[in-house]
Amino acid sequence: MNAGNDFSFEAEAEGQVDSYSWDFGDGNAADGASVEHIFESNGDFDVCVTVTDACGESVEECETVNVSGVSIDHVNAIGVNVYPNPSTGLYQIDLPNISGDVNLKVFATDGQLLMAQSLNTNAYALNISNLAPAVYFLQIEMNGVQYFERLVKTN
């Protein structure tokens, strides 16, 4: 399952399993039968899980995962802080490194643009309380650099 660049992986094996080791193909790894990983860039990644049994025997399975997010990189190069998250719909967005105009957009998980706003301030109160409880994507662009944040809206 995935939402943008955020993926959940789950492995199942028969018999007595001693460990599950994941290699996400981007230099990061994790252990466990069920893991989550956020890819920091778009592209194709070979994700592999190695299952080791109590006797030390291992089996590896790999699958190529295409990461495309909302066509932007998930990198906080512009020092954005969004809180609280999750929220009932009121979020504070701090932009300490602002220089020039900032474009803010909120998308549904299907890519539908729900809101667009231009800012020229280093703090903004985002109100999406009129939207249904769900996961949304926030895109902030400043000086050609894009930042992406997953917003979780609750009741």
Image (cartoon, rainbow, N blue to C red):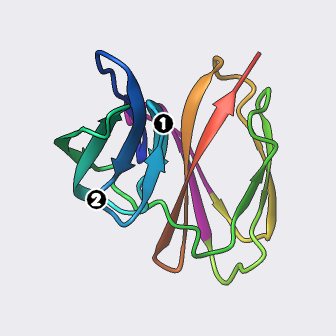
Residue 115 is one of the magenta-drawn residues: yes
Where is mark 2, residue-wise?
Answer: 25
132 or 10: which is nearer to us? 10
Q: Which residues are magenta?
A: 102-117
Where is mark 1, residue-wise?
Answer: 32
Say whether disc 1 or disc 2 marks the residue closer to the N-terminus: 2
Q: Quadrant of the N terminus?
A: top left
Mark 1 is on which residue type?
Answer: Gly
- Identify the residue shown where x is 79% and y is 43%: 91
2 or 73: which is nearer to us? 2
Mark 2 is on which residue type?
Answer: Gly
Across and down, in percent, residue 25 comes to: 28, 59
Whether residue 69 can be seen here: no
Q: Residues within 10 Å of mark 1 (few under 14, many from 20)?
A: some
The reply, left or right, for residue 15 in relation to residue 73 is: left
The reply, left or right, for residue 28 in relation to residue 95 is: left
Element type where label 1 sits in the image = loop
